[in-house]
Image (tube, rainbow, N blue to C red):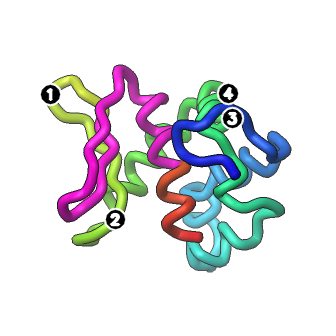
Amino acid sequence: MTTPGSIGSTTAPDDIAYLCRLPRTFREEAASAYSLVHRSRTTPEKISIEAVRAVLDADPQLIGEWQRWSEDKRTSSGWFLDHQNGNHIVGHLPRGPRLTFPDAASACAEFIVRELKAIW
């Protein structure tokens, strides 16, 4: 089982790319995030942060799409992605962990893996 922060992925790159495009697919289709994630040929536990980062490096626009996803959630509980005082932060509301990253892509990759697991 792959967990956030782990190395390696047991999932094909196309399956990881599909999950990474969730915000885009969500806007284009009349389906819930839950159903879109479950439409995947894999589970979030099988993807690694490194594999997600490779998708983000190939399609950097996804970082902004996930930032908007986080901002649009409007919830009092769950994972968030933020940029504060030059830091890129992944955290959990209301009083969960807050992780700081040196760059947006690293933070976004961490957020994606955690968010997909929460949706699953």
**Disc number for residue 85:** 1
The correct choice, above or below, for 84 with respect to 29 in the image is above
SS at mark 2?
strand
Of mark 3 and mark 2, the one earlier in the sequence is 3
The reply to whether dot 3 and dot 4 touch (C-beta < 8 Å) is no
Q: Is 100 colored magenta in this rendering?
A: yes
Of mark 1 and mark 2, the one earlier in the sequence is 2
**x 41%, y 35%: residue:** 107
**x 72%, y 45%: residue:** 17
Residue range in magenta is 89-112
- Residue 34, given in percent of the width and then of the height, sits at 59, 75
Of mark 3 and mark 1, the one earlier in the sequence is 3
* Label 2 sits on residue: 78
Q: CA distance from mark 4 to mark 1?
A: 27 Å
- Describe residue 118's horizontal placement relative to residue 55 as left or right: left
Residue furthest left in the image: 85
* Label 3 sits on residue: 51
Along the line of sight, the residue nearer the viewer: 5 or 106: 5
- Describe residue 70's horizontal placement relative to residue 98 as left or right: right
SS at mark 4?
helix
Q: CA distance from mark 2 to mark 4?
A: 27 Å
The quarter of the picture where residue 61 lies is top right
Pointer 2 local density, CA inside 10 Å: few below 14, some 14–19, many at least 20? some
Of mark 3 and mark 4, the one earlier in the sequence is 3
